[in-house]
Image: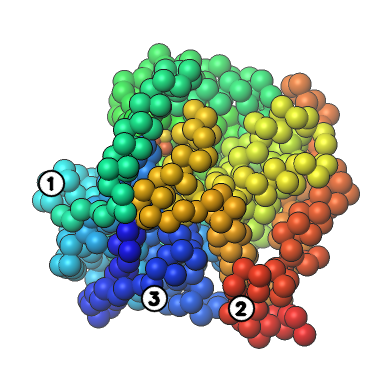
Amino acid sequence: MYGWNGLFLNVNLSKKKAVANRYSESFAKTFLGGRGFAIKILWDRLKPEIDPLSPKNILVFAAGPLTGFALPSSSKLVVAAKSPLTGGYGDGNVGSHAAVQMRKAGYDAVIVEDKAKEPIVLLVQDENVEFLDAKDLWGLNSFETEKKLREMYGNAAGILCIGQGGENLVKFANIVSQEGRAGGRPGIGAVMGSKNLKAVIFLGSGELSAAYPKEMKEQGAEAYREVLTKPNYVFWKRQGTMSTIEWSQENNVLPTYNYCEGTFEKADAIGGFAMEKMKVSNRGCPHCNMTCGNVVKGSDRKESELDYENVAMLGSNIGLGNLKQVAALNRIADEFGLDTISLGNVLAFAMEASEKGIIKEKIVWGKFKDTKALIEDIAYRRGLGYLLAEGVRYVAEKIGRDSQRWAMHIKGLEISAYDCHAAPAMALSYATSSIGAHHKDAWVISWEVKVGRQSYEEEKVDKVIELQRIRGGVFESLTVCRLPWVELGFELERYTRFLYAATGLEMTWNDLNLIADRIFNLIRAFWVREYGRKWGKEMDIPPARWFENPLTKGSQKGAKLDRAKYDVMLKRYYKKRGWDERGIPTKTTLKKLGLENAVKQLKKRVKLYD
Ligand code: SF4
């Protein structure tokens, strides 16, 4: 096999045992890598309804066949498990030396089972696997942890770790690497914490083997050169995703005051140009020459890596218009290992609940010091922080008083940073995303703004599905970054050429889209298997706020989603996906994709297909 290593490492933490096993080329061709491998492993090995924070959950680190080669933006891996936040499939990707080193150590995925008795660090150095005592690291934040491990294992080591958020089982704790590269927002860091696993270190000395090494080298060099010649390259390096603040403000989609509005009165102060004045350097993932992490110094004088999502969620959405302070909040979130999107959402929810008098604590919009203290309380699960650490769906259910209507989540995952009062396709994208309301699978909003905001027509459904295939299916499974394609206009055929050089397989985008559909449907089957008879169309409906409370400001003033039209759009989406009226893949759809086992299991579990 070329491209893929063909090896998984199975780790049992309680037995302190690690066993490598070969997988077949047909498995690789069927599920590609990254997200595809992760869902197949979780589907096969997890029993339905296990407690995600119990030793029965499985934590997967998985990469794709391009990861680690000298190709632009190709050094990511997927971290996945059953999510403690949503109860469904959860994953995220991290751009990190850990991805490269894991592959060089010889593994395409590391599968972690059970729970260590005491805090440990897992060291994977080629075929040598060690379980190191981590009692001294437990309680440290993610930056301190990585620093200590780097002192011992050197700069070449690829390190993934958790902060106090993961240790204290905050349901939206993530996994952090290289001081601010983070992934696994549906609580994958909490799963790691529940296993007493403080960090994983990868060190690999092997070489990846490409089917056509010369072609691979040429393709990579040409692609790196192409990045530099793109017209928007220079501006991208200056601002990365931060210019989206100004774009969102102009287009009335900047989440503001818990998604009440799409414009923020202090947007200029937190936008891309404001950031440029503070910027000290660029940081990014390995193998990337369009690095997008904007490093600034926050009000605490510490470095913080800013991008659109973390600034919108810890800025406009909580009413904070001071970028240095936003940077300081972002820094502590990364230190604690808390997902900034969910965190900004949870904080805004608490501020609104306080304003409405539903909770007794006084938490005021945009108050930096109080917000910082509340983030600490969440990370350590103290006071109100204990409740907020559960995520907005749970908090709203707990405090009631109709707060579910403005608890901004879908399937339990807090919505990322695009307001959808006037963006039905983006709302559909969030609603049908693989992990809950995340933008990664189908960032359709920039296209939607161009083609017209009010339409609920078929072309919108088609676009969401097209993007879900390319981004959520193929890029997440090749584990390459989508941004060269999205932002610099790389042609998609580049990736089939990369794949050919790496694996020797001539796959077309039609072949890849079919794999993407297989992955997407297996993920949906996973959700249905978990939720059983509780599963229904309501799982794919955005929060009531977007349907009920129109925007009061900006170019889209008066806009809100139309529920009847949304329902028609969703029905059309289900039909095109080959799903029934509850959003469950039909027997025919699953069989067509070679997922007969899913038919069997769903039949048993939810008495389907009788
Ligand atoms: S563009 Fe940004 S996210 Fe993508 S690989 Fe480069 S640094 Fe990482």
Residue 335 at least partly seen:
no
Q: To which residue does mark 3 refer?
A: 55
Q: CA distance from mark 3 to mark 2?
A: 28 Å
Determine whether the residue tagged by mark 2 lies in a helix, strand or loop. Answer: helix
Query: What residue lies at 70% left-to-right and 43% top-to-bottom?
Result: 463
Quarter the N terminus occupies: bottom left
Query: What residue lies at 61% left-to-right and 40% top-to-bottom?
Result: 443
**Residue 190 falls in which quadrant of the image?**
bottom left
Q: To which residue does mark 2 refer?
A: 596
Determine whether the residue tagged by mark 3 lies in a helix, strand or loop. Answer: loop
Quarter the C terminus occupies: bottom right
Q: Amino acid at mark 3?
A: Pro
Is the residue marked by circle 2 packed among few (<14), some (14-19), or many (20+) residues within 10 Å? some
Q: Position of residue 513 (x, y in %)?
A: 59, 54
Is tag 1's residue or tag 3's residue first in the polypeptide sequence? 3
Q: Position of residue 145 (x, y in %)?
A: 23, 50
